[in-house]
Image: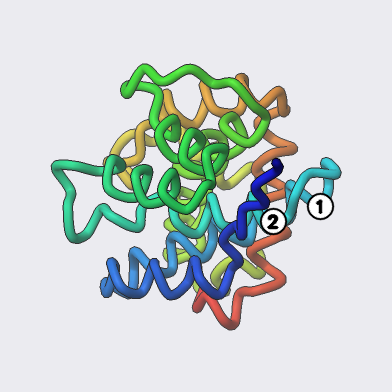
Amino acid sequence: MFVILDLMNRTEARELLNSMTKNASLLRHMRTIELVMEAYAEKLGEDKEQWAIAGLLHDADYEAWPEEHPNIIVAKMREAGEESIAHAISAHYTKWNVPYNSLLDKALLACDELTGFIVACAQVRPEGIATLEVKSVVKKLKDKSFAAKVERDEVYTGATMFGVDLNEHIGFIIEVLKRERVELGI
């Protein structure tokens, strides 16, 4: 006998996110990762819904349970039968020492810190992301005082593990975020 799991859809993922997170900046961060992950899934022929949900929910428990992050959201994903998403979320920071078993795991790691950094770069420009160039992001990455909380080693390790050229990766993320700059306020 086969059991067919009714896996989570994006509407359910948003409801779960909104039940756990209220901070507008954190919600925007997760939305940006959702968009970038969805675009990468489309580019690579992967499951867009799964990749987008992983991006959307990767920090869902951070505001309410920062000391337990990401264990709460990982448990909820496992309860929902979303083992691949649960594993990717559990691995989105290298210092947690979780193995990177899939392209989804590597993509989430590669997109999280860097996308947040790119948003920070856009926020200090008069035209926002509309005129942001790859070389500007690369230059800011070298300035340790800019967006100092962003761990540069996570950015570099993520791109390497995902198997993408850092400059191309930055350019891809910028283009994805430009398409939604009005919604994102960047």
The one nearer the camera, 72 or 31, is 72
- 129 versus 47 height, above or below: below
Dot 2, how many residues are within 10 Å of its Cα: few (below 14), some (14-19), or many (20+)?
Answer: many
Q: Position of residue 58 (x, y in %)?
A: 43, 49
Q: Position of residue 61 (x, y in %)?
A: 28, 55
Q: Is residue 37 visible?
A: no
The one nearer the camera, 51 or 140, is 51
> Can you say which quadrant of the picture contains the N terminus?
top right
Type of residue at label 1? Answer: Glu
- 113 versus 38 height, above or below: above
Find numbered disc 2 in the image and state the secondary structure of the residue it sits on: helix
For disc 1, the marked residue is 42
User: In the rendered image, which quarter is residue 38 located in?
Assistant: bottom right
Instruction: Pick out the residue farthest to the front.
Output: 1
The reply to whether callout 1 and callout 2 are in contact (CB within 8 Å) is: yes
Q: Which residue is drawn at the image coordinates 54% and 21% (left, top)?
A: 100
Type of residue at label 2? Answer: Glu
Q: Position of residue 137 (x, y in %)?
A: 55, 45
Mark pair 1, 2: CA separation: 6 Å
The one nearer the camera, 131 or 158, is 158
Q: Position of residue 71 (x, y in %)?
A: 28, 40
User: In the rendered image, which quarter is residue 94 located in?
Assistant: top left
Disc ID at residue 38? 2
